[in-house]
Image (cartoon, grey):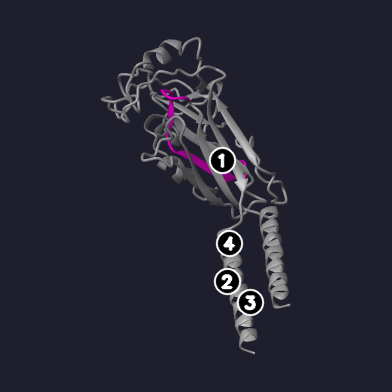
Amino acid sequence: MRDRRIGNRMRSALSLAALLLASSQCHATFLQISVANNQPAGGFAATPFWFGVHNGTFSTFTNGGVAIGTPIQSLAELADSSALETAFTGHGDQTNVRSNGPIPPLQPGEMGSSFLNVLSPSTNRFLSFASMLVPSNDYFLGNANPTGIPLFDAAGNFNGTKTIQIFGRDVWDAGTEVNNINFGAAFIAGVNITDHTAENGVVRFIDITGTDAAYLNSITGKTTPTGYTISHLITANDLIATITVTAVPEPSTFVLLGVGGIALLLTCRNRDSSNARV
């Protein structure tokens, strides 16, 4: 009889835990953002990704616009997101995702993740991201349309797991630095990333088989600071990275479940001990 009572209590606790988790996920504002570099060995790397969730009015860059003097310039040329983070302050919630490996860039086959608590999901519904693609002078990944990736509906409900695949045809050229892999390019051994020849161009998608073909071919055989040689060049349909956004229980939910579970175990133990002494 005693074992049956204890079993009933445990089943009740598990049911409560399931309800709490389900409720947390239905109304979740706590997100896990993961990034995987899908490039094969010898492929390109991606610097830590910046993510911001906002009301749809914050634009990181504009297709055909001038990037010189804007926050996206330092990210696209130097992999430095600090200016973008400063510009975004007050517009919503932001985080960075770096590699789980020994260095921040996500090298081929690596992945990383981060958590983000969206404080006002009914207002700040849209996701923006940016990362430098390396080796390059000013190639980057990102979304120009500030309302193109809605994570929440107008009531603040999470729209469900979001998967974003980035292909070679989605890579941007910032148009701020002349493409010369031997001068100013990032992630090439022996090259000074701070060197710079201004291009005075505009943001555009790279032309893999046209105007950018010679530049991409010049990257073949170059050695990265981590010791591997670039042997795989991106094509239009080449999958570069995958971003996954999921809703997860807030840490407080786990704490609540943990405290409740401990309390239940102590109660069962105390009652068991009490019955054993009778």
Q: Quadrant of residue 105?
A: top left
Q: Are marks 3 and 1 in contact (CB under 8 Å)?
A: no
Residue at label 2? Answer: 262
Q: Residue at x 35, y 27 (%)?
A: 186
Q: Residue 207's x, y, as percent?
A: 51, 15
Secondary structure beneath label 1: loop
Query: In the figure, is residue 27 to the left or right of 192?
Result: right
Q: CA distance from mark 2 to mark 1?
A: 45 Å
Residue at label 3? Answer: 268
Question: Which one is nearer the viewer's eye here, 93 or 32?
Answer: 32
Question: Which one is nearer the viewer's eye here, 96 or 82?
Answer: 96
- Identified by mark 2, the residue type is Ile
User: Which mark lies nearer to you, 2 or 1?
Assistant: 2
- Identified by mark 3, the residue type is Cys
Secondary structure beneath label 2: helix
Q: Quadrant of residue 125?
A: top right
Q: Is residue 29 above or below residue 96?
A: below
- Identified by mark 4, the residue type is Phe
Q: Quadrant of the C terminus?
A: bottom right
Residue at label 4? Answer: 254
**Is residue 145 in view from this perspective?**
no
Residue at label 1? Answer: 58
Q: Are marks 1 and 4 in contact (CB under 8 Å)?
A: no
Within 10 Å of the Cα at label 2, are there few (<14), some (14-19), or many (20+) other Cα atoms? few
Query: In the figure, is residue 120 to the left or right of 201?
Result: right
Q: Are marks 2 and 1 in contact (CB under 8 Å)?
A: no
